[in-house]
Amino acid sequence: MNIEYFDVIIVGAGLSGIGAAYHLQDKCPSKQYTILEGRNALGGTWDLFRYPGVRSDSDMYTLGYQFKPWREARDIADGPSILKYVTEAAVEHGIDKHIRYGQMVKQATWSTDDALWTVDVLNKATDEMVQVRCNMLLMCVGYYSYKGGYTPDFAGRDEFQGQIVHPQKWPEDLDYTGKRVVVIGSGATAVTLVPAIAELAEHVVMLQRSPSYMAVRPYVDPIARRVRKFLPEKMAYAAMRFRNIAFSGVFYKQTRTNPEKTKNDLLNGVRAQLPDDYDIETHFTPRYNPWDQRLCLVPDGELFESIRKGSASVLTDEIERFTESGLLLKSGQTIDADIVVTATGLQMEMLANISLVVDGELVDFAETFTYKGMMYSDVPNLITTFGYINASWTLGVDLTAEYACRVLQHMDKAGMRQCTPRLHADEQKMPARPWIENFSSSYMQRSMHRFPKQGDREPWLNTQDYKRDRKMFRRDALDDGALIFDNPSNRSVLPAG
């Protein structure tokens, strides 16, 4: 059987996959690559999620690619605008011609003898399994399941006579005009959904078990507007990107060093949006410190405007059970509803549940240590893209893609076909810490046991620190004693340099 070969296979045609492909074309133009996408469209998250008001909670100067300026007026963009931006990036650079849709990767098997990954792919159009091969796998599949989100097992759910919807599977024909809607949750999705639905619904209740921190900022940054007026497009974009990265870094550091001040600043921002007699303590004061969970962005204070107008309200309580007409809460209160939206989170999964086999051994990621947050101990020629929980996802996309290109260039120069993170003997016994630390969100806590561990020293860390990663990925030596380059090619071997 004739099996196609590529130097690099990128899995996933979302924000990460398109970014990785650009850097690969730019820095390693001789490498042949393809992108395998399980769905029938590019865009990943921004094509999958279609609920009302869907948007980013990161500004587009940092969520956008470093190689493509964001041109629209709003700095906080809605889902369709982001999808359009990612599509434009793919088309402008010819990346779209490398995408194979409906190709669901099921397994990848590494052979050291051949220095090859053999990738088993389900062709969804024909329901046939095919194989392709490569030397390097770039995994750009994110960290959550596309099959469906997380919904708790609520008692009495089957008794409810209305409609129950999860935002990840939003029905195109769902009509909430004049309806009583309950949105369960207090995260970014709920904060986005409530004001969007409240424009047409009779009333929307945001029912939360506990509050989240919220930050108000404008859809259009006035500083960005002035900068764009006086500087050329690329310079303005670079300047705003630099400024926003620096600001978010300073802000996050303050949440770690002076959480009480940050907490008061955020709560004062909420107070300024609501009537003086509103119960901020109950409904908007979390039980944790800022950035122990992800901050919710409220552009132009739209959620608070809905509350002031009376089209939406916030209720802090726990669900006892569903009833025929709505919800019974543990306080004894009842809420009548026509539609209940379970904005209760994502189902995290490791590398889209793709099975990886290395020289006949199935990889258990929970038993591996992460190398710089993107590779795994004893797993060769595989680099994964993960963004930041405390900054824009795409900052991680750009850095990881640049690093992957450095690795490919180094392998060519050294005449080696393989790069593998290896633990030294003294590192085998280092303390194992969770892949993500100091982040208490339920969707993370439910799944951390399935993810790789991190150690207590570089390079076995997942720092979640963009400034630190930028130096490590761009300037630190590749031959660091942990990432082992070996498995020489047949051609003459050049010095590693």
Image (tube, rainbow, N blue to C red):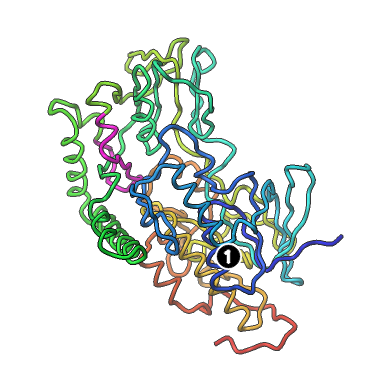
For the N terminus, the image quarter is bottom right
For the C terminus, the image quarter is bottom right
> Above or below — where is 112 with respect to 287?
below
Badge 1: few (under 14), some or many (20 or more) residues near its Cα, within 10 Å?
Answer: many
Relative to 237, 408 lies left or right? right
Q: How many marks?
A: 1
Residue at x 43%, y 65% (from the top left corner): 456
Asked which quadrant contains residue 196, the reply is top left
Q: Nearer the viewer, residue 484 or 174?
A: 174
Asked which quadrant contains residue 465, the reply is bottom left
- Residue 442: x, y in percent? 43, 39
Dominant SS type (magenta): loop
- Residue 478: x, y in percent? 51, 77
Q: Nearer the viewer, residue 419 or 71?
A: 71
- Residue 410: x, y in percent? 57, 79
Three-letter amino acid code of the residue under disc 1: Ser
Residue at x 45%, y 28% (from the top left corner): 342
Residue 21 belongs to magenta span: no
> Above or below — where is 396 with respect to 259?
below
- Residue 97: x, y in percent? 64, 58
Residue 304 belongs to magenta span: yes
Q: Residue furthest left?
A: 276
Residue at x 65%, y 47% (from the top left corner): 38
Q: Residue furthest right?
A: 1
Q: Nearer the viewer, residue 223 or 3?
A: 223
> Above or below — where is 35 with respect to 201?
below
Q: Report which residue position mark 1 lands on.
A: 377
Instruction: Give the SS element for disc 1.
Output: loop
Q: What is the span of residues highlighted in magenta in the rendered image?
A: 285-305
